[in-house]
Amino acid sequence: MFKKILIANRGEIACRVIKTARRMGIATVAVYSDADKDALHVEMADEAVHIGPAPAAQSYLIIDKIVEACRATGAEAVHPGYGFLSERAAFPEALAKAGIVFIGPNPKAIEAMGDKIESKKFANAAKVSTVPGYLGVIETPDHAVKIADDIGYPVMIKASAGGGGKGMRIAWSADEVAEGFARAKSEAASSFGDDRVFVEKFIVDPRHIEIQVLGDKHGNVIYLGERECSIQRRNQKVIEEAPSPLLDEATRRKMGEQAVALAKAVGYDSAGTVEFVAGQDKSFFFLEMNTRLQVEHPVTEMITGIDLVEQMIRVAAGEKLTLAQNDVKLNGWAVESRVYAEDPTRNFLPSTGRLVTYRPPAEKSEDGITVRNDTGVFEGGEISIFYDPMIAKLVTHAATREEAIEAQARALDAFAIDGIRHNIPFLSALMEHERWKAGRLSTGFIAEEFPEGFKPIPPQGEVAHAFAAVAAFIDDKMNGRKRGISGQMRSARPVAFDTDRVVMLGEERFEVSVAHRDGAFVVGFGGRHEHVVTSDWRPGDPVWSGAIDGRTFVMQVRPILNGVHLAHAGAAAPVRVYTRREAELVALMPEKVAADSGKQLLCPMPGLVKAVSVVEGQEIKAGEMLCIVEAMKMENVLRAERDGTVKKIHAKEGDSLAVDAVIMDFA
């Protein structure tokens, strides 16, 4: 077994590999760019080597720098994680020349299956059902349009070396093919160093199901069940689960056997994934194979009890698999949510900055429920524009799908992040969505259920009362603290104070009374309802956890003037608590009117200007492309919202812009 390995990656996957290596007694080496010098994976590893500037193309993607880091530290093997160099055959070849072991499949398997075009050719030869498409390399937009016309719309334009939703576009017309071709090639080049793309038929109302395979260097290959990854946004997975609510045992076996046959055909020898697009009728077609570890591998680990990173390391060291297919048993259900640094209320645009608050739920296993959080950040750390916006992967496991979803919802409510925008409110809303709970999924789920984008759910009914009661509880706690600090409660006798409050839940008004009764806090709503509130919450805690009338509630808490901003189960609202007199005075205050920015194009996220498509004085039409801003490896096309004329352009190609920076003015 290896004594020291290097992880050629960053973020949560580097931390994930380090945890397993540490458990196995293997020393670890981290590599880092300028942007990652204070990163968590650098702190966790036994050693760390600086490999260059922040852009991945100048650091994490430079093979020679990784090889040199191995030589300098004496690392015997390299785990590539996912992304970056993990599916570049040239990487293990360079490592082999240097006498270093690659913890992953052999280069021939990577070439055969890591390349989406070649993998489809192998699948066809192995008689695996594949999606109709053109398997050759496409050189021009006109060529792409002709192929798409022949296949029939809609089509998917995909980077041959791609993954993670990068270099991927759906096109419903010839015009969209031409533009999607350009964007896919550009993203593929910047993310993978390979701009080849291909076109295939896009299956309408599909489900995304993948089979985890595990092989060794002695010809043994098994499958470890399936994962469903149908909840996607911009072709990037958001929520994954294992097993799939669609499959029965017979379909699972057919998919697994096809995946194993394909892996054996190319001599696959590590932990990889064969992906399928499935119809609602359980028909399925080979989509692609990812030869490296998948982001969503934890859900498979949770239901099988198999540490995939450990298996990869053991296989790379030449060990045989100790598991046969009959040894693989699926236990319970696991759900994973990807927590991203992005603003779901602004079309999921990336968000960067410092994590002023980062308090994930505690990892634990009790009462049949397991909570796991794979992360690569820490409170006070920075989210950079240079890399993927993932903050963490929150995983819950339970005996049933319903219990796993309920546990996931509670864990999301207990996940406190501040300083940047994040997608936890959206994930929480998804957990409460009836269609998701029923397992009626497709890759179009988010677009179909949130056609106007995501807006926090306004608290209503029971949840509105819970928000008001918790806000009143917090206000009482804060007032008690203030009185104690000011010395007003030094005597044993309680000091009388006004117990009537006005709670403003957004625009909704609740007149309440508060009282301490038999050791509990009681909130009365106009004499009609009383709620007993219990909690050990303390001022400053970012999460309120307690019970209302005996029912458990968990809410995220952020202080605001005269109250708190609360979030729970996808609902969020500012809640302010006043005395009656304060409420009367607040009602007289004029409302602040937001400035009109309708004649400006503002940068919706921190990013780099890739191109400006117009000039000053040009007349533009609604929907016309104005510029392209790249953030976190994704290119975002900014378009005109209405007809007009470009008055002045403030940004140029290559500029780095902050959020809401003015890009151009309109006449």
Image: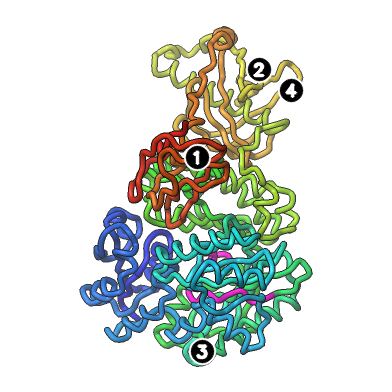
Q: Position of residue 142 (x, y in %)?
A: 55, 68
Q: Nearer the viewer, mark 3 or mark 4?
A: 3
Q: Secondary structure at mark 2?
A: strand
Name the outermost residue toward the bottom: 218
Amino acid at dot 1 = Glu
Q: Examine the structure image and report whether residue 169 is included in the region drawn in magenta.
A: no
Magenta region: 285-299
Q: Nearer the viewer, residue 335 or 195?
A: 195
Task: Quickly name the residue at label 4.
Answer: 529
Q: Secondary structure at mark 1?
A: strand
Amino acid at dot 2 = Val
Q: Nearer the viewer, residue 19 or 418?
A: 418
The CA span between labels 1 and 3 is: 58 Å
Q: Secondary structure at mark 4?
A: strand
- If you read the primary sequence from the N terminus, does the residue marked by circle 1 or circle 3 appear first? 3
Q: Which mark is residue 267?
A: 3
| Residue at image location 59% in from the left, 36% down from the top | 546
| Residue at image location 54% in from the left, 64% down from the top | 296
Task: Quickly name the residue at label 1.
Answer: 619
Task: Quickly name the residue at label 2.
Answer: 512
- If you read the primary sequence from the N terminus, does the residue marked by circle 4 or circle 1 appear first? 4
Q: Which mark is residue 366?
A: none
Residue density around tag 2, few if under 14, some if 14–19, many if 20 or more, within 10 Å? many
- If you read the primary sequence from the N terminus, does the residue marked by circle 4 or circle 2 appear first? 2
Q: Nearer the viewer, mark 4 or mark 1?
A: 1
Q: Are marks 3 and 4 in contact (CB under 8 Å)?
A: no
The CA span between labels 2 and 1 is: 57 Å
Question: Which quadrant of the rendered structure holds the N terminus?
Answer: bottom left
Q: Nearer the viewer, mark 1 or mark 3?
A: 1
Q: Secondary structure at mark 3?
A: loop
